[in-house]
Image (tube, rainbow, N blue to C red):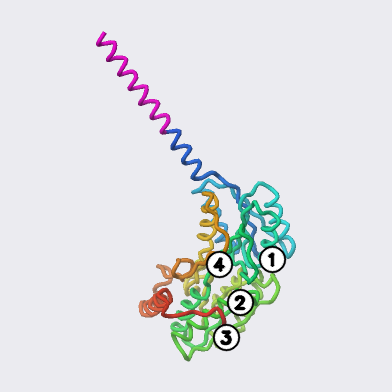
Amino acid sequence: MGTVVRNFAVSALLAGACFSITCSGRAAETSATEAGKGIKVGLVFDVGGLGDKSFNDAAYAGLKRAEKELGVKGEYREPGEGAHREAHLRSFASGDAELIIGVGFLFTDEISAMAKDFPKKKFACIDYSISDEKMPENLAALTFREEEGSFLVGALAALKSQTGSIGFVGGVESPLIRKFQAGYMQGAKAARPDIKVKSVYAGVSDSAFKDPQKGKELANSLYDSGVDIIYHASGSTGLGVFKAAEERKKLAIGVDRDQSDEAAPGVVLTSMTKNTDQAVFDIIKETNASGFKGGAHVFGLKEGGVGYVYNDKNKALIGDEIHGKVEDLKKKIISGEIKVSKDAN
């Protein structure tokens, strides 16, 4: 009888253990599913589309990371000019996408209207142009302090320049791109008060962000005037700036991502990095975990949202002394000792 009881007890214990293991496994599986429940995300690119080696590619990298790490289902569209942006946003909102992201300030009006038309959906816009008008609660504005990162590359360019003259090529002349120009000019003057900064823009229409030939022409004009380093904030138009720098054996500065591979070695002095990929990933992660928050999300130097490239590819070109001076300026911006204006003086 004692043997039977002992056998029964052992059997019960084993069964309980098996039940516990099974339940634990299911609980873990359920928890993992809840953590990455696989929402549908629709991404609509800015002018230039996928393959611009800059802004759009960074947003795409954030989407792909979210697919891999969070289990979300992503889909993207590449609009043409004008109204196509609205059509793609509406297509996603009318379907099963739970979060719709517009890449670029050009989406501001369309995405605001769309958020009002589809109050149960979540929307986000990179570089949304915030105004005094109240934003819909289901819309997140993902904005950056581009002027802070541009301040650092402006200082770097001024300290590196041999001619005492540096240049800036912008895409569409707009409040957003003027922030890049403003920061660049302030950083250059802070590092070297006697520096000359010459600025030009590719145009006033969307095409100004996707015209490499225009970028090359503008860059050559600046180089002809005595400029020896050019910073661009012009989408794929900037690829023409790199081409001119390469042919003229001058220096150029990239934008949004590390663009050192877009020209011959030694041509791209550095790049002002704007972590659009991280911003896209973060808003997807928040939404996937039911933690979406509308309103302004601002990324500056302090938040790691902007910066500049200093690595094995360019540190010899920059040098320890210049790097040290730029890092000191960076610390002062983060601490608040230096305030960078959004407006060019």
Q: Of the residues under marks 1 and 4, which one precedes in the sequence?
A: 1
Q: Position of residue 278 (x, y in %)?
A: 50, 60
Q: Which residues are magenta?
A: 1-24
- Residue 46 counted in the magenta span: no
The residue mark sitting in front, 4 or 3, is 4
Please name the residue that numbered disc 4 is placed on. Answer: 143
Tag of residue 109:
1
Q: Secondary structure at mark 2?
A: strand
Q: Which corner quadrant of the image does residue 20 belong to? A: top left
Please name the residue that numbered disc 3 is placed on. Answer: 198
Q: Secondary structure at mark 3?
A: strand
Are the residues at dot 3 and dot 2 in contact (C-beta closer than 8 Å)?
no
Amino acid, disc 2: Gly
Tag of residue 170:
2
Q: Residue at x 69, y 70 (%)?
A: 206
Looking at the rendered image, the quarter that the C terminus falls into is bottom right
Q: Of the residues under marks 2 and 4, which one precedes in the sequence?
A: 4
